[in-house]
Image: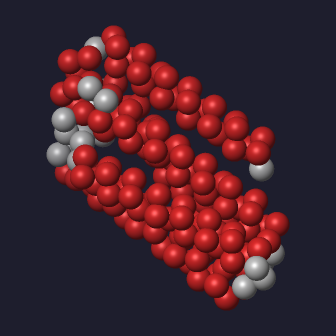
Amino acid sequence: MWILIVSEVLVFGAALTAFLSVRALDPALFAASQGMLDRTAGALNTVVLITSGFCAAMAARAAQGARIGLTRLWLGAAAALGIVFLLVKAREYADKAARGIDIDTDAFFTLYYLITGFHALHVVAGLAILGVLAARPTPANVETGTQFWHMVDLVWVLIFPVIYLLR
């Protein structure tokens, strides 16, 4: 799992480095495009994923104590918040689509959709992992699976300021 996590963090790090490099070439375009983002939705998603990470940590703690019901409850809460994240992101995408903003709009939005879309796919994969953990909530499984979920949280905590806030 650690090899997967490190490789994924490196991929997202490279993507964010590319984003910052292209931004340096056309700061005016990036500032104008960034102004079209919903910072409130991005901030809400940050709180949602951090809270979800807390729930995953509590699931791992409950699993260590062999409290299967409580472990499943915390895993369910983490997954529910992951779904909330995806719903907020889908609303963001739908809002942009309604305004005619898509992956071909400009360099900013090409990178925005690639990075946030790739992250959303990781959230979906994490939800599948959380489902497997709920079915087989051994301490080792829960510890390993929630490590992936924490990576998803960490990556978003890097994506949010770089894409939504950095001027």
Residue 96 shows in this picture? no
Work out whether 56 lies above or below 165: below
Outermost residue toward the bottom in this view: 69
Residue most toward the top?
25
Judge from the rendering whether residue 9 lies leftward or rightward of residue 26; answer left or right. right
In the image, residue 127 sits, relative to residue 20, either above or below, namely below
Residue at image position (38%, 42%) is 160
- Residue 7 placement (x, y as % from top left): 70, 36
x and y, in percent, of residue 89 in the image:
36, 55
Tell me: 102 left or right of 63: left
Quarter of the image for residue 108 reads top left
Q: Residue at x 81, y 75 (%)?
A: 138
Above or below, 101 against 148 in this view is above
Tell me the quadrant of the picture where the C terminus can be found.
Answer: top left
Total marks shown come to 0
Coloring applied to the structure: secondary structure
Q: Position of residue 84 (x, y in %)?
A: 40, 67
Q: Is residue 84 left or right of residue 55?
A: left
Q: Nearer the viewer, residue 145 or 70?
A: 70
Quadrant of res 131: bottom right
Q: Position of residue 122 (x, y in %)?
A: 57, 52
Query: What residue is rendered at 69% in x and 77% in y?
Result: 62
Seen from the viewer's position, the closer of residues 129 and 154 is 154
Q: Is residue 17 visible?
A: yes
